[in-house]
Amino acid sequence: MASNKKIQIDQLDRMIKPIVEAGDFAMPERGWINLIRNTINISEEQFSDRLKLNRGGIFSLERSEKDGSISIDTLSEVAEALEMKLIYAIIPKDGTLDQFISRKAKTLATQIVLDSDPTIKIDRNGEYAEDVVESIESLATDIKRELRKSLWE
């Protein structure tokens, strides 16, 4: 992978590390807005005053978050009204960005190596011969270093 891309990936991995380490952030059944509003005991009236909405607007707001149609701008306004902050991120489902790219590169390399020689066999233990494994690993390293666009096809 080009050194500047490697640096970018490492920087992004450092940025997302605290989020990854925190674990899953499944949305609460009634949504974050409703959960926080009720937990800190801010009434619909108080909340609607802060957001300059009517009480029906609060219901719509909470419903739109629950159904996934709320905008990031609106979530940011809600966070501000609650004197909190919005954290927004897109992160790999498992591990770091570097691990994600490595996994994708290995999958692509395996496909390319196996497609190039239809006689490759898997042994009784479900593994490839050592030379095949070395070919896959070498190609995966090249694919990752080059950050080939074919990773995303």
Image (cartoon, helix red, strand yellow):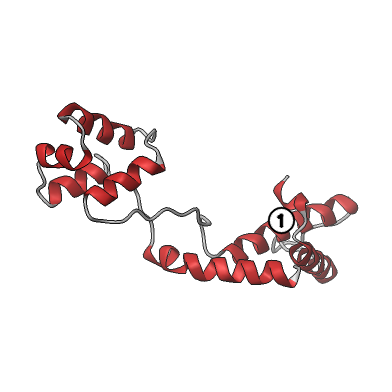
Does 111 sit left or right of 21 as displayed? Answer: right
Closest to the observer: 2 or 106?
A: 2
Asked if residue 3 is positioned above or below residue 74 in the image, the reply reads below
Closest to the observer: 45 or 23?
A: 45
- Give the residue at x 63% y 67%: 8
Task: Give coordinates of residue 4: x percent, y percent.
Answer: 71, 70
Query: How many numbered marks does the figure carry?
Result: 1
Asked if residue 41 is positioned above or below residue 133 in the image, the reply reads above
Q: Which residue is mark 1?
A: 107
Task: Give coordinates of residue 111: x percent, y percent.
Answer: 78, 52
Q: Give residue 67's quadrant in the image.
A: top left
- Give the residue at x 73% y 52%: 151
- Residue at the limit of the structure toward the top, as seen here: 56
- Give the residue at x 42% y 63%: 19
Asked if residue 73 is positioned above or below residue 127 in the image, the reply reads above
Quadrant position of the C terminus in the picture: top right
Q: Give residue 60's quadrant in the image.
A: top left
Closest to the observer: 143 or 81?
A: 81
Query: Which three-letter amino acid code belongs to the residue tagged 1?
Result: Thr
Quadrant position of the N terminus in the picture: bottom right
Task: Give coordinates of residue 127: x percent, y percent.
Answer: 73, 63
Does 141 sit left or right of 56 as displayed? Answer: right
SS label for mark 1:
helix
Task: Rate crowding at label 1 as few (under 14), some (14 to 19) or many (20 or more) other CA atoms within 10 Å.
Answer: some
Task: Give coordinates of residue 14: x percent, y percent.
Answer: 51, 71
